[in-house]
Amino acid sequence: MGKAMDNKKSGSSQRKFRNLLINPRYQVKYIFWTTFTGLFLIFINAMVFYVFIRENYRILVDMSPMEDEAKVQLYHELHQIVWLLGGFSVVFLVAVSIFGLVLSHRTAGPMYHFKRVFKAIRTGKHELRIRLRPKDDFADVAKECNEMIEYLLKKK
């Protein structure tokens, strides 16, 4: 029984990952716009930061009486800061994109289930109802749809 349970757990986690894109057209568009917005903001912030800091470095470092070695070191540190900020921004953007995928799944999954139940009811399977996972969106809509189905069946 333990082995069967382990297989079931690994199978369900594989199934969940494989089915993450339930409605690819909607979800990819959702993730694209989220990621594009993030990239745009990162680019604007990086450009503003770099332009202002670079200008201050030109004024303060190049005109200061310090040795050339110290100036080179300060410019090297400026470039390190820019690369670190860029790297952290990319990591953050990837995390936001993954979060967007999960959120879009919680929307696309219920819509997929709604469509399946509606098609099945149209073909005569009147016993079906909409059952969503606890964290899915549209639980209130599912409840209303189930009540409507019950009402229509009573009227028949």
Image (cartoon, grey):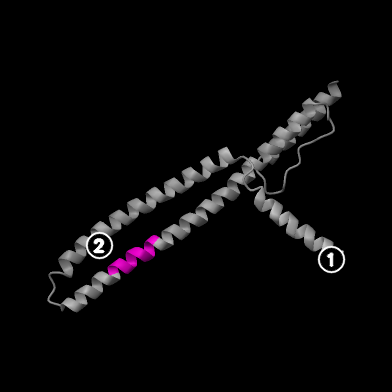
Residue 108 image point, x, y percent: 63, 41
Residue 147 image point, x, y percent: 78, 32
Helix, strand or loop for the magenta stretch, by majority: helix
- Amino acid type for the residue under numbered disc 2: Ile
- The image shows residue 65, relative to residue 15, as above or below, that is below
Which quadrant would the C terminus be assigned to in this image? top right
Label 1 sits on residue? 2
Q: Quadrant of residue 137?
A: top right
**Of the pair 148 and 36, the residue shown nearer to us:** 36
- Amino acid type for the residue under numbered disc 1: Gly
Left/right of residue 23 with respect to residue 154 in the rendered view: left
* Residue 14 tag number: none
Residue 144 seen: no
Q: Within the magenta stretch, is there residue 6? A: no
Q: Are marks 1 and 2 in contact (CB under 8 Å)?
A: no
Considering the numbered disc 2 on the image, is that residue within a helix, a strand or a loop? helix
- The image shows residue 2, relative to residue 65, as above or below, that is above
Q: What is the magenta range?
A: 78-86
Residue 11 seen: yes
Q: Quadrant of residue 84?
A: bottom left
For marks 1 and 2 on the same chain, the one whose residue lies earlier in the sequence = 1
Left/right of residue 96 with respect to residue 113 in the rendered view: left
Residue 68 image point, x, y percent: 16, 76
Q: Residue at x 79, y 28 (%)?
A: 121
Label 2 sits on residue? 53
Residue 141 image point, x, y percent: 69, 35
Left/right of residue 50 with respect to residue 63 in the rendered view: right
Specify few, some or many for label 1: CA neighbours under 10 Å numbering under 14, 14-19, or 20 or more. Answer: few
Specify few, some or many for label 2: CA neighbours under 10 Å numbering under 14, 14-19, or 20 or more. Answer: few
